[in-house]
Amino acid sequence: MHRYGPSLISALTGALFLLVAVTQSLAQSTLRDPWGADASVSPAPNLRWETALPLPAVSAPVTTVELARNQLLSLPELTEFALRNNPRTRQSWLAARASAAGVAIEKADLLPQISAAYNVTRSQQVANAGNIVPWQTRFGPSVSLSYVLFDFGVRGYQIETSEYRLLAANLAHNRVLQDVIFQVEQAYYRLIGNDALVRVNSQSLNNAKTALEAAQKRRESGLATVADVYRAETQVAQSQLNLTRSSGELEKSRGQLASVVGLPVNVAIGVQPLQQPPQITEMTTRISELLEKAKASRPDLVAAEAQVRAAEANAKAVARAGLPSIEVIGGGGHTLFNDNRAAVSNYNIGLALRIPIFTGFRNTYSARQAQVQAEAAAASRDVLFRQTEVEVWQGYYDLNTATSSISSTQAQVRSSEQTSQATLARYQSGFGSILDLITAQQEESNARVQQIQSYLDWFTTLARLQVAVGASDLLKAAGGAK
């Protein structure tokens, strides 16, 4: 003992001090990035990040169902296809499935936790007398068991938290379905409206060409000036420009509809046009009834309430995590040796009382954080609640306004059409001026455009109100499109 004790301790102490000195020297030296982490980012905030490695290729979305080709599709058919193929619906559904698995994960703590191991140990020990014991090899299987008997309801609140989160995820999925339906309706009606605008502008171009021909004939007969021809040519050019713009908007709306249903934007989709103007009636449901219905049927609002309940349950679980818990522990093992000694088996079972004494105030601040998060979730719910009220309120009165404007635009179209025809007939007969004819044709074109816009506003406003309320049966209340 006298021979090895002091010298060994002195050697170990010296080695320890040397290790500390080397570690401090390395920490204070320029070698502060041994793994080259700084080289993996841009060297300065104003420089673009570059890499010599190939970037991963972006995979194109997979189309889950096939769309009928060479067939004019109705709005219900497009909606059904979008619900099956839009990536957002798949994303929200998978999120709900993940939340369902989270409930099962929390429920796993209701059962005993059992683990098995197989250990192989090779060791050499020094006896107190300084004699060296030969190397020994021990090996064998073992099993351990633990089960929480009592934890002041922590497991129950954790399960409740996961269940409310699952409820919120399912409601969020329902809301995504409503959003996709609304997007399809918007894109469909915009496509129908732009297609009607193309037809109106094409008709306006034909009318302008007719006026130009009339002006040229009158110019040849000496009844009109060259200025009349120039005005008619200007009107033809303006009508051609309007047609070009509306054709471009039509193609943009086609791409938007294709994207909404989950297809590439360059895929041509044929839609069924409206055979006749829809039958529009005023909304009979009162605004107070719609507000009450939104509170109960709007999925994202109910999901926000579920998130509040989940945060409150989590706050209770975290607050109780610092309390004692009682566990059943047990295990067994079978140890074998590489020499001639007999194998040994051991078993144990007992109760364990775990009492957290001091965790650096971790439990205190964890409970405070969970409580604040619960209050923040309640505030987010209140924000959405007020937003819902505003959306329903505005949507209700926007729909009433759109309904009233339809009858006005219908009267404007009838009047402007008769005025344009009468003015053209007078001008062809040698009466009136080219300015009167151009003005009448412009008024007819504007009236038709306003009529199309009024129907488009009615459709989109109704769809927006349905999303705000969270219901899809308001079309019957508003009269609908027959």
Image (cartoon, grey):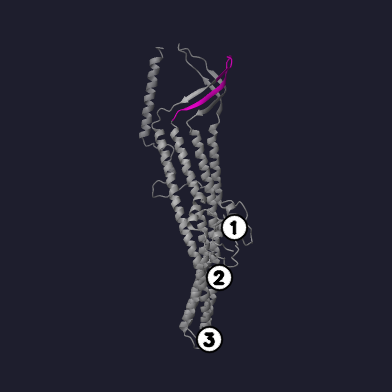
User: Is residue 351 something one can see in this rendering?
Assistant: yes
Query: Three-letter amino acid code at disc 1?
Result: Leu
Give the spatial CA distance, label 3 vs label 1: 51 Å
Q: In the image, is 47 to the left or to the right of 238?
A: left
Which residue is under mark 2?
199
Residue 340 among those drawn in magenta = yes
Write down the region rendered in magenta.
323-347
Q: Label 1: few (<14), some or many (≥20) within 10 Å? A: many
Query: Three-letter amino acid code at disc 2?
Result: Arg
Labelled disc at residue 78: 1
Label pair 2/3, CB-CB below 8 angstroms = no
Residue occupying the point 54% across, 32% down: 110
Q: Position of residue 42 (x, y in %)?
A: 42, 46
Give the spatial CA distance, label 2 vs label 1: 23 Å
Pick the front one: 65 or 447: 447
Indicate the secondary structure of the residue bearing disc 3. Answer: loop
Which residue is under mark 3?
429
Numbered disc total: 3
Indicate the secondary structure of the residue bearing disc 2. Answer: helix
Q: Label 2: few (<14), some or many (≥20) within 10 Å? A: some
User: Nearer the N terminus, badge 3 or badge 1?
Assistant: 1
Residue occupying the point 51% across, 69% down: 407
Q: In the image, is 164 to the left or to the right of 33?
A: right
The secondary structure that most of the magenta stretch takes on is strand
Res 339 → quadrant: top right
Q: Label 3: few (<14), some or many (≥20) within 10 Å? A: few
